[in-house]
Amino acid sequence: MIAERSRVLSRVKPGGVLVLAGILATQFERVVAAYAECGMRLVATKAEKEWQSGSFAWEAGIQSGKRKARERDLSGS
């Protein structure tokens, strides 16, 4: 999930929520940190036995700012 985060995050719309499940509890904090680096914040989590899941949302203004920068790069402005 960490290696594919750019591809995964490109599919999350502004205001959208990303749910990641099937994460080993021992690896969960690494996943949270990796997605936080990209502007996502953990809004809910659930653990069951050795597994943990999390719901993530964009930090305020982060996703729209990245989209605007990407559009600017593509337009050459």
Image (cartoon, rainbow, N blue to C red):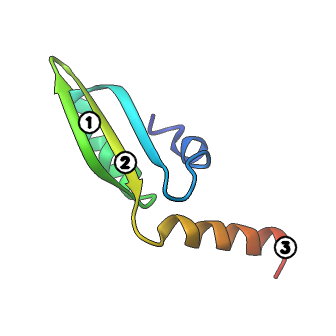
The percent coordinates of residue 40 (x first, y second) are 40, 56
Earlier residue among tags 2 and 1: 1
The percent coordinates of residue 64 (x first, y second) are 57, 68
The answer to whether residue 62 is left or right of residue 66 is: left
Category of crowding for the residue at label 3, using alpha-carbon neighbours closer than 10 angstroms: few (below 14), some (14–19), many (at least 20): few
Instruction: Give 16 or 77, whichever is nearer the viewer.
Output: 16
Cα–Cα gap, marks 1 and 3: 38 Å
CB-based contact (under 8 Å), mark 2 and mark 1: no
Helix, strand, or loop for circle 2? Answer: strand
Report the amino acid beneath label 1.
Phe
Instruction: Give 1 or 16, whichever is nearer the viewer.
Output: 16
Report the amino acid beneath label 3.
Ser
Earlier residue among tags 3 and 2: 2
The residue beneath circle 1 is 28
The residue beneath circle 3 is 75
Report the amino acid beneath label 2.
Phe
Cα–Cα gap, marks 2 and 1: 13 Å
The quarter of the displayed image where residue 54 is located: top left
Which residue is located at x 51 percent, y 43 percent? Answer: 5
Of tags 2 and 1, the one toward the viewer is 2
Cα–Cα gap, marks 3 and 2: 30 Å
Which residue is located at x 31 percent, y 46 percent? Answer: 32
Earlier residue among tags 1 and 3: 1
Helix, strand, or loop for circle 1? Answer: helix
The residue beneath circle 2 is 56
Which residue is located at x 26 percent, y 36 percent? Answer: 28
